[in-house]
Image (spheres, grey):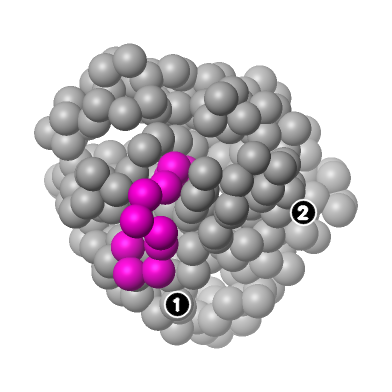
Amino acid sequence: MNIVLVPGLMCDAAVWREQAAALAAIGDVIIADHADSDSLGGMAERILANAPSSFALAGHSMGGRVALEVIARAPQRVRRLALLDTGFEALAPGEAGERERAGRLRLLAMARAEGMRRMAEDWARGMVHPARLADAPLMESIHAMIARSSAQIFECQINALLNRPDRTALLGDIGIPTLVLCGHEDAWSPLARHADMARRIHGSRLVDVPDCGHMCTMERPEAVGRALLQWLA
């Protein structure tokens, strides 16, 4: 079995490290690299150009949105789908959308002025369960991962997210075994959104990971790994 894992915003292979090790026992694991793509569609095209003819596909955060773009372009190539701590709608209209835009651009300005590490320390505080903020090894792994990238790549990925398409209609067309997973305390992509996604995808399975924020694969690697193994069984 071929398994493609798609990282989220400013994440690299480290975000999937524990799950990739577990899944390697049952298949060939590929972790996507978005390079300097500045659209979700471009990221999806990059995956399709480098992936085997058929594969299981899992995406975390922005990577879940990229996974939906892969489905939109080549549904016949994807055998199973997993969407983790992610979303499916376009940028909200009006004040809500402007708040998201302003928040993302504030972080980009910080990355440019103070460096990626400083931005990571600010951003990551809202990305994990509050109880994990004192977990120095976890926080260091997140900060270091983000600091390995650049403000230029950050800008590309922010542009991709701010210009994301609405994939609400696509959800009803998904007919493959689908896992929808969310950290219970995810403040960025809340559980209610995932319950809505699961209702829209026929036959999907919703997994609620307790005591977990947005960075589920790093916060609760064992729980996420178990869910993915069950998804592929």
Q: Is residue 50 magenta?
A: yes
Q: Nearer the viewer, residue 225 or 133?
A: 225
Disc on the earlier residue, 2 or 1: 1
The reply, left or right, for residue 209 in relation to residue 153 is: right
The kind of residue tagged 1 is Ala
Q: Nearer the viewer, residue 94 or 172?
A: 172
Q: Which residue is mark 1?
A: 35
The image quadrant that residue 120 belongs to is bottom right
In percent of width and height, residue 12 lies at 59, 65
Spatial CA span between label 2 and label 1:
24 Å
Q: How many marks?
A: 2
In contact (CB < 8 Å): disc 2 and disc 1: no
User: Can I make out residue 115 in this image?
Assistant: yes
| The label number, if any, that marks residue 17 in the structure image | none
User: Can I make out residue 61 in this image?
Assistant: no
Q: Give the crowd class for mark 2: few <14, some 14-19, many >=20 residues within 10 Å.
A: many
Q: Which residue is mark 2?
A: 139
Figure check: 40 above or below 169: below
The residue drawn where x is 29% and y is 48% is 77
In percent of width and height, residue 202 lies at 26, 17
Magenta-colored span: 48-60
Quadrant (top left/top right/bottom left/bottom right) for the C terminus: top right
The residue drawn where x is 62% and y is 81% is 115
The kind of residue tagged 2 is Met
In percent of width and height, residue 11 lies at 57, 62
The residue drawn where x is 54% and y is 59% is 30
The residue drawn where x is 85% and y is 45% is 135
Q: Secondary structure at mark 1?
A: loop
